[in-house]
Amino acid sequence: MLKGIIIKGISGFYYVEVGDKIYECKARGLFRKKNITPLVGDRVSISVVDEDTKKGVVEEIHPRVSELVRPPIANVEKVIITFSIKEPNPNMSLLDKFIIFSEKENLEVVIVLSKIDLDEDGEITKAIKEEFENIGYKVIAVSTMTGENIDKVEEELEDSISVFAGQSGVGKSSILNAIEPDFRLETAEISKKLGRGKHTTRHAQLYKIGKNAIIADTPGFSSFELNNIEIEELQEYFIEFEKYADCRFGSKCIHKNEPGCGVKEAVEEGNISKRRYESYLHILDEINSLRGKFKRKL
């Protein structure tokens, strides 16, 4: 058998790169019986059915280092979370949710703010950049129109498997085109009626940049729900809460209604972003409503 990596999956066909060759493969029925779906990024072993037409079968999926649900992709080490300053306006709640998913999977987070050329006085860019840099995240503000800081994004991609993720129309494909023009990825105008972009990327796909970088462009989207996180664990993914979590209720404190909560005091004192805390409460309520019933009511 040959070993390779799935670089694209469309309608039940998996395109596996083995050296300088790409094989179109179907997955063994055994995976379906075990409720296992091959993902882009999976390291796999394949058997060759026809070498001339490069047809094969995925026989084995090797253990995954990480697995994202949305976008569905495996073995990512770094997430390039991309949001635009304008057109569409930044959806901060969605940005927080992307970070939660990334933290849950122990992935390195880099936030890219795109279309900064549309921020005439730079105030929107400055505010978002400061908020997340104060937490400890790396933030890169870029423009594909001027080329500003595109090189810094490229540096972040070196020696890692990275995924670009973000809402529709923020310019993920444009950034990749700016880094490697040969990609020629499709881009689209922003819908004036909806205020968001059209989905020009229709499936997750891996691309190589240089010798040491593998990246994934993924379909954009405007919303998703957190349905695999428990109420008590949510606070773990708001990393700025950690040093203020010395509360009367200890690890059971969810930083909402408890008196003497260190996190709430930090918000009042300006040491934790009020917007981030309000986002935490909103997501907490969202998780609660999704669960329906919990052992411990809020």
Image: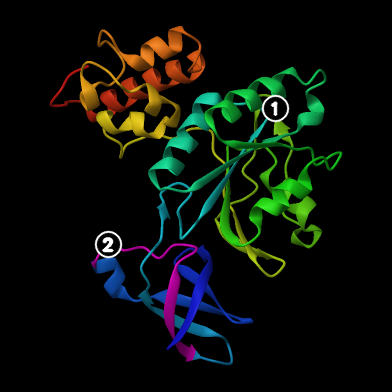
Circle 1 SS class: loop
Q: Is residue 184 magenta?
A: no
- Disc on the earlier residue, 1 or 2: 2
Taking the magenta stretch, the answer to whether it contains residue 36 is yes
- Where is residue 296 drawn, in percent x and y? 15, 22
The answer to whether residue 80 is visible is: yes
Q: CA distance from mark 1 to mark 2?
A: 40 Å
Rendered position, 191 above or below 53: above
User: What's the magenta region?
Assistant: 34-49
Q: Residue placed farthest to the left in the image?
A: 295
Q: Is residue 186 visible?
A: no
SS for tag 2?
loop
Q: Nearer the viewer, residue 26 or 126?
A: 126
User: Residue at left 72%, top 55%?
Assistant: 185
Quickly name the residue at label 2. Answer: 35
Residue for point 27% across, 62% down: 35
Quadrant, the N terminus: bottom left
For residue 252, which quarter of the picture? top left
Of the residues shown, which amino acid type is indicated by label 2? Asn
Give me the residue at 51% from left, 91% from top: 50
Image position, residue 282 (x, y; %)? 39, 19
Position of 238 compared to 248: left or right? right
Residue 221 in the image: above or below residue 9:
above
**Dot 2 crowding, Cα within 10 Å, few <14, some 14–19, many 20+:** few
Of 245 and 184, which appears nearest the observer? 245
Tell me the quadrant of the picture where the C terminus can be found.
top left
**Mark 1 — residue?**
85
Q: Residue 147: where, in percent of width, then height?
A: 84, 43
State whether residue 125 is above or below residue 266: below
